[in-house]
Amino acid sequence: MASGTVLPEEARAGEPVRDVVRSVIAALAPEELPLVDGLRRFDDATVVRRLNGRSRRREPLGFGIGEVAALVTPVVWLVLDGVAQRMVSATVDRAAQGAAGALRRLLRRPAPAAQVPPLTREQLAEVRALVLAAAGQRDFPPERAAEIADAVVGRLALSPAPDPSAPRGAPGPSAPADPAGPVGPGSPADPQAAPAPADPPGPDAPGPNSGAN
Amino acid sequence: MPPPGPPRRIDERVLGAGTSVRFVTLLFLLLTACGSMMLTVLRGLAHGDQEGCNLAAGVDPDDGGYWAPIVAVSGQTFAYRLCTSIWAPAPPWWQVVGWPVLLTVAAALLFLLLPLRKARRGRVVPLESADPEGELRSLIDELAAVTGLAPMPRIVVDPATASVNAVVFGRTGRPVVCLDGGLLATRRTDPERFRAVLLHEFAHIANRDVTLTYLTVALWRVFLVLILLPYLLWEGHVVQGVLADGAVPRPDRAMLLAAVLVLLVHLARADTLRSREVWADVTALRWGADPRGWAAPAAPPGGPLRRALGPFLELWRTHPRSGLRQGALTDPAPLFRVSVLPLLLLGTVPVVTPTHLLRQLAPYRVDSSTNVLVAIVLVPAVLVTGVAGVALWRAVAYAVLTGGRVPSGWWAGAWLGAGMAAGSILNGDGVGWAWLPQRPAVLLVPVLAGAAFGWWITQCALLWAGTWRGRTLRPALLVSLSAGCLAMVSWLTWWLLMGVAYAGGFTVRADAMVRTVQRWFPSAAPSGDLGRLPGLTTVLPLLETVTGTPLIALTVTALWVVPLLGWAAGPAGGAPRWFSAAFPAPAEESGGPGGPPPPRVAPLRAVLLPGLLGGVLACLAVAGLQACLHTGQPGPDARGGLYALRYALLLPAVVVVPAALAGAAAGARAGRLRLLGSLVAAQVAALLGLVAAAVLVSADGCVAPLNVLSDDCAWRPVWRRPLFPYLFVLNNTLTLAAAAAVLAALAVSTAAAARAVRATRRVRRRPAGGSGTDTGTGTGTGTSSDSDSDDGRTGRRGRLAVALLCVVAVGGASATAGHQMYQAGLVTDVTANQRDYVQRFGLPYAPVSEPTRQNQVHAWYHLGGYRFIELAASYSDGLTAAGKGSSGPESWDALDGRFRAACTRWRDAGTFELAWFRVPDQIVQADWHAMIVRADRGSRGCAQALDAHDSAGLLNALRDLLAAGRCAASANARIDAVLRAGHYRGTYRTPAGGAGAACEHVGQ
């Protein structure tokens, strides 16, 4: 603590990602609420893994026309989860994180829901950029992508203002800018992976660990 | 004339889809293949020396052919069994049977686990989780009520999948429908799609696709892991071993078989699944789905390569392209279309699967009779006839219902036959390890047989479509396919037994055939010109194989009785009832025109009359033949041989010629049903001719000018008549008459096609002229004169004649088939078979290289030959020892005590040639054979001389036995020389030299 290390629970203080997602989807694409409600039955890791996974190949006895719906839910959920994970990895001691995870598995307790902490204005701007990139990758038209990004940022802006003393773990360039890939680099599933900037940060963007120590 | 409108929609269920049979065929293929493939692995792991036994039998490993190795092994069956039982024993039978059982159990377990895995937590959620308000549930219940599904399937949601899709899994009794997230999200924006997808999945359940599909998936996956993987590993190990020895591996048919099996199962399964998708679409449409629900997103434009490969890539997909599916919604033609590629793949199954089963059986039973082969081909024949037959019947039904062109069926059948030819190449039947058989042209026979099969099935379908009175065609389909199945059984029996042998170089010697004929027809007269009889070594063996096919007479009878029954029923009169069942909506409601007229069928007398006239002609021809033969009748003791053979060959000929004429006449009068008309007429004529022949032969001797075999009048039933091969005449007459009918129908069809072409040209030159010429492309099956003058109804007398003909034909053929199968039993006499083989085909010494000959002699000696040489040497030593110590005249009792035991031991040498292989070196074999002949003669003579107190006889016998010992020593010495020349160690026994190893060959 004296060295500035923050416990996972403290790092996650904020609003659960799934709640933010539901709120955004309810406002933006209410027809997807059944999906969000269904996804909420899974833990965060499962949701991210499934949403990142490839669309199911043609199965025997499927309908098989091959159309894929342009869904907002994966865009929002994956970006916000990436933000949450980056914040955790930026602030939490890896050893403590690992120990907590092992203890949790030992006690068979479910993982705590990922939470999005209150973000600064700069961080919100970066979140917006991430949403735009993710929506663009999923072939949303620019207008719709902007609409989604604005809705996400608007929803996050309603959260309480960040504590100035809180670590400045920005969403970072390695947040899931590539939602189609596996779990994003830097996520708990791959803590050793180097960040792979899909979108180079601006000169003011803080480094991944800039506020951690 | 009603105004043209959209065609009335046909109920696709007018006939069954045949999907279950297709799936069962795949399952059967996998189950039979697994035992055979694992037997290969198990035998390989046992490190047996089957190659050594082949070498010892005199097989040339460099000979890629089929016939020479077969003759070498089959002519020495006993020795081969002894060798393999010691050096390459088959694994315990339960290990072979265990694999299909294991595969089945593992597949059943996987089948039960698959739905659990698909519906596991973390992948799907219950519908209630995504639909707390119950809105979706009520909509789904409403759709399910339309379909009448019971019980209601379990619904789950895969919220993480964005595709607008759903899938059903589980089993038909307990299905689970999984809705993708994308489908739920677009439910409001695209309600037509939502309904279409749901109804499509429900249709899969209602059409009973779920269990069969996932059972096939489970079996295939288990097969890949449990069978194919070990098999490929073993094959890889073998190839690696060959490469490690510095040799080049031969083109390996086993690997090809595995590859083709994978290809075949994958393509056949994909094809079946594609048709099930269209079925589900059409069912969903019938339940009220909106065709707009099948609108597909525009596909990205592909490059020229992709466009060119499109049809090929389509074959691998489990779903048809969207254009085809949308088209099927308006016209279900794809569900009635016959595709040739699936038929090609299907054609391999009835050839590959019996071979797999025979390979599993062969190590345990070498004495299986033809009946066992009939039993083995029965299941594949049923499956293949079911799949191909249903497909062809559906195509005909669709053409009849829509007034379109009726397929001829021969083209599809030819593809089926091509599959059989390909399957034979794949198996290596008749091929050895070479890629093509010695006579590749014989592979055209299955293609022709397949074409005739397809033609017959199609014509039957067309005939019954016009005469069947029931609400559904299924009973008629069943009856026709039963006859077709019988034909397939007979065909496969013949092909696997003899056809592949012909392809592989089957050759019989003239002297062997002369001996065979003399055995059939014993005669006091010399064989004379028998050896120079044309066709003695080509046609006669072929006719003999037809005689030996047990169900052939019954098959041919079924092939004409079934259509004759259809003809006897006569036209249905107006629209048949099955027509109305095929059009679910009345013409007025659908707004379309009424259905086309039912196919016209030529009247019964158009085919029966030529048959009866041909029969009369055949009767006269038989009587004429008898009279002709009577003029050259030899004495009572000389009526066998060439005389009896000539009678047996000419009798079918004089019956078949009028039958062919009758067939041609009927074919010309039968409209489009030329093949059936020709077949019925030819067979009726043949039947009458055969009845006349049976009467004349049974009463031979009673009408002096017609006497052929007897001079005294007595009733001798034809099937027990000496010097008359009843089965030979019956089976060959019926088969040749059927073949003649097919040729006659072909000729008539060709002539009709030529006439049609000329007529078309005339019409084109005079466009304003009449257009009443029948080009044969419609569904009309009767001739114009028939339709003008006769409504085609069959009179009472006609039906009576048909009933009588059918009873006589079916009764006679069934009794013959039953008797023939009873006589054949389940096992054959291996000794007699081996003797027969040697008599017919000999055991020729193929020219081989010197190293190969040395290897063969080495295998012969070390795998067992040395034991027999040692035995002969011990007999010789025993006799020498018995002869020592004689110092003057002895009493017969003393001589008996001294020599009888030694003489008796030598008698065992007579079995050496049966128990072990002939020596693969001609010079050594001459010594060996001389030893056996002298030993046999000497041991018998010795015993007789001792019994008769014949001192001269005893002396001769002992000389023979001593000579036998010298021949054994000579053989040992020569084998030693051959082995040492091949850089092997010499014989265990030191070779004797000089006079002690001088063998006087028999006859010297």
Image: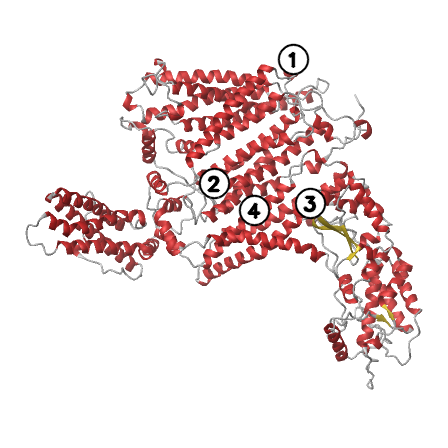
The Cα–Cα distance between marks 1 and 3, rounded to whole angstroms, is 50 Å
- The reply, left or right, for residue B266 in relation to residue A112 is left
Foreground pick, B804 / B84? B804
Chain letter behind tag 2: B
Residue B717 vertical position relative to residue A76 in the rendered view, above or below: above
Which of the two labelled residues, at mark 3 and mark 4, occupies the earlier sequence position?
4
**Disc marking residue B209:** 3
Foreground disc of the pair 3, 4: 3
Q: Give x and y (percent) for residue B273.
A: 67, 45
Using the image, name the chain to which the residue with label 3 belongs.
B
Residue B51 seen: yes
Q: Residues within 10 Å of mark 4 (few under 14, many from 20)?
A: many
CA separation, marks 3 and 4?
Answer: 19 Å
Tags 4 and 2 both on a single chain: yes
B277 vs B825, nearest the viewer: B825
Under mark 3, the amino acid is Asp
